[in-house]
Image: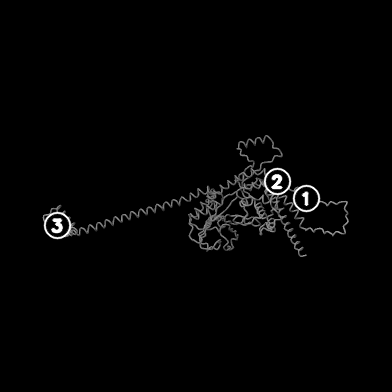
Amino acid sequence: MDANYLKVNVYDALTEAISAMVVDVPDDKIEYIGKYLLTFVDRKQLLKSKEKHRNQIEKELNNEIQSQTIQSSKQSIVKAEEEAQASRLPKFLDSLKSLSVSKQSAMDRTVSFISEFFNIPGVYIAIKKVQKGETDIETLNYYSSCPGQEFVVGKQLVNQSIDADSDPVLRSGVSFEAFKVPVIEEEERDEDEEESLTSKSKPIPKPEPLVIDNVMRDQRCKFFGIPKLGYYVAIPFSYQSIEHESGYVVKGNDDENLNEESNSVVDNNNDNNTNEANEEQELNEEKPVAKDATPAVVYVSNKVTQEFIIGVDTIGKYRVIKSNEIESVKLIGGRMIEVFEHLESKLLEKQQDFYSKYPNISKQVSDLLTTLVTEEANALSALIPAEPIVNENESNEPNEESEPIEPPVELESHKPFLESQAIVNVWNKVFTNDAVVEAIGLLDDHALPLTTHVLNLLHVIGLLLGFNNKDLLDVCSNVSWSVFKQKLIPTLATRISDYNILSEGALPKENTIKHIKSLIEKNNLLDISAVPNNLPVFQLLAKWLEKASVGRENAITYIKESKNRDIEKQIN
């Protein structure tokens, strides 16, 4: 027990003292061991303190290394994110052309990217259009918006033209200001300076982005949603476009009105090279052209300026839109214009292909128009009742025993109704003709917009055939060739051939014959001269509309008189 006690309590100290004594070999061994034991505790405490300090330093060092590793990792992540963010814009610009199958898809991709990339809550695109009339009306039509701003799509902003000295109309819209070219005041210069400047061409001023730093404070700003504090920028763009009703027309004597960069195309479906064309010209010079030869129709592309804005705002989530962000949006808008021009080049190719296929079928439709007058006359003559056959053996004297028979009273509207019905049936039948059906089907390949007159004609025909008005208009309530190609043209021939002027309740309530006739008169839709000569199928449609609208009106009158007569009979 005592030995164990000594081993636990003093063994280490005595072992260490004796070991040190053996190494040092002092003269007085007992004194050496005593002194060594006296300093043993201090040495142990010092060693423990040093060990503790060393451990603390190692711990701090490990913590520092770990912290630096984490910081370096974070920096690497941030750098990678910054590099990825920086590469997103070039990648988007490079991919926009290949991923956009239409202008609408290009606009939708653009507004979504700008909103997400710059963290801007409101981004939209509005196209400037002019409604022709006694006084032209400029409108901004909102066709695309980023997610969360869908309520803007379909809105129209009318340009409230006011005098410079007049007060602006409150909350009528300010975006048209973005299209104005800034006025640059000329500074007074000496004669020498003027001579030196005349040799240098002055840069043409261009519209600049419109910046509104507080939309609540600027009383011109119009809100399509709930008014809130925000920052607004309207960035204007313009390009030369062929996507309009005169974008690809027959070359005539007034070609000086066409764009100088117009692209002439001969519609003879001939892809011969220049040498072959020259050889053909030499042959033509040697051999005179026959008098009855029909010259090839030449079409030219005609570009006009198309303007639009990309609008960005932080309404409801106020922050300043920085100048570098505006410059980036201008860069994106410029790339979108390149996509538009690429898509229009495809449209032009499709339009050229359309005119190469259409002339033959077009002539067949024109020939049909000349035969319909005769067919109308034949249909009307078939309505004339034959004279009653009188039996000579029978006496013409009335039989006193028989009761007198009163002839039926014919309604005044009956004859006009029967005549209209016969005429409409003649015109309906035309739309089962193979040439007419093919001509209407080929219209799907007509890539560029048709004239406003033709679009209004198709719109009213659609109403008469029972379409809802909203189904025939685009999101901004404008007549649109692309909408007609999608919803009206595919079934047009079938619907017309099946049309019945007596179909009660076939039309939506808002498509009254009175409303349809007012649209016909307002837009002068029965004027055949306003229809393009190279598309006679629309002349056919205009004549059908004339016959069908009159027939429908006569049918309604006849139905009303018939019902009134039945009521009178019941009363009597």
> Marks 1 and 3: CB-CB under 8 Å?
no
Query: Where residue 382 is drawn, which disc sits there?
Result: 1
Number of marks in picture: 3
Q: Label 3 is placed on what type of residue?
A: Ile
Q: Where is residue 293 in the image (x, y as percent from the top left)?
A: 70, 39
Q: Kindly state the secondary structure of the residue where label 2 is placed.
A: helix
Determine whether 254 is above or below 283 in the image.
below
Residue drawn at x 13%, y 53% as measured from the top left: 25
Instruction: Give the Cα distance between marks 1 and 2.
Output: 26 Å
Name which of mark 1 and mark 3 comes first in the sequence.
3
Instruction: Give the Cα distance between marks 2 and 3.
Output: 134 Å
Mark 2 lies on residue:
366
Q: Kindly state the secondary structure of the residue where label 1 is placed.
A: loop
**Crowd class of label 3 (few under 14; some 14 to 19; many from 20; radius 10 Å):** some
Name which of mark 1 and mark 2 comes first in the sequence.
2
| Image quarter (top left, top right, bottom left or bottom right) of the N terminus | bottom left
Q: Label 1 is placed on what type of residue?
A: Ala
| Image quarter (top left, top right, bottom left or bottom right) of the C terminus | bottom right
Q: Residue furthest bottom?
A: 571
Along the line of sight, the residue nearer the viewer: 430 or 119: 430
Which of the 4 quarters of the picture holds residue 124?
Answer: bottom right
Q: Which of marks 1 and 2 is in front?
A: 1
Residue drawn at x 34%, y 54% as measured from the top left: 66
**Crowd class of label 1 (few under 14; some 14 to 19; many from 20; radius 10 Å):** few
Instruction: Give the Cα distance between marks 1 and 3.
Output: 150 Å
Query: Where residue 325 is drawn, which disc sits there?
Result: none
Q: Can residue 48 be seen in this view?
A: yes
Q: Kindly state the secondary structure of the residue where label 3 is placed.
A: helix
Q: Position of residue 348 (x, y in %)?
A: 60, 46
Q: Label 2 is placed on what type of residue?
A: Ser
